[in-house]
Amino acid sequence: MIIVKPDFTLDEISDIILQEIKLHPRCHYLDVFKLLYQAFYGPSHLEPQRDTIIYNLKRELNDMKWKTDVPYQDIGVGKGFIRLNLISIISLPDEDLKQNSMLLNKKIPTEYLKDSEDKIKILADCILQSRFENEINWNDWIETWKNCIPVVKSIIPATPEEGLMIEDCLTKKIMPTHSEEYRQWYDPHYRVIHHSLLRFIF
């Protein structure tokens, strides 16, 4: 299957932003910039190195603390990409653990991570399959973002600092991390994959 850039209407872009605010009400303009990049291009910025992807997944899972969260967030209105929360690929000994607070805010036990090895490899393959066949045209993203700005600003305001940071990212062809408040409140740990590949995870 060839993955292509979704063709969102302005109303769909608005829905994607509003859904993000519903899930993460303390998100900032900067976080929406990151969100829309992921909604349009998924994980296409990642190098197609399976071993590196697996290594980074294992390292992040090792450092994570258990939390309750939705398994995934649809950032493509059912026709594009999703954010798969990494906690959802951890294999627990029974369903009860998923519903109680035994592990809440504690590091995930090593034995649970070992049981998730196969899922980690499957997720790595899903990430690779979610990339565009060709490299991202950065000018296309700049133009796409410019077209989104009126919708974004009608929903969430930008600080002068965020505006400058985004301009710097566009010039340097990089993606920012989430805002500090977003990281403090939500401690995000996810990977972006195409929605059609979700069936291989669950």
Image (tube, helix red, strand yellow):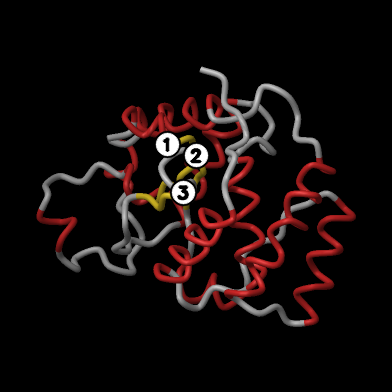
Q: Which residue is mark 1?
A: 195
| Nearest to the observer: residue 77 or residue 115 | 77
3D distance between C-alphas at marks 2 and 3: 11 Å
Contact between marks 3 and 1 (CB within 8 A): the answer is no
**Circle 1 — which element?**
helix
* Residue type, label 2: Gly
Image position, residue 9 (x, y; %):
57, 49
Given contact means CB atoms under 8 Å apart, are the residues at marks 2 and 1 in contact? yes
Return the residue found at the far top.
1
Residue 199 vertical position relative to residue 20 in the rendered view, above or below: above
Look at the numbered disc 3 and give the secondary structure of its residue. Answer: strand
Q: Which residue position is annotated with label 2?
A: 80
Q: Between marks 3 and 1, how big is the CA–CA gap?
A: 9 Å
> Tags 2 and 3 in contact by the CB under 8 Å rule?
no
Residue density around tag 1, few if under 14, some if 14–19, many if 20 or more, within 10 Å = many
Image quadrant assignment for residue 198: top left
Task: Measure how far apart labels 2 and 1 are at the Cα level.
Answer: 6 Å
- 140 horizontally vs 178: left or right: right
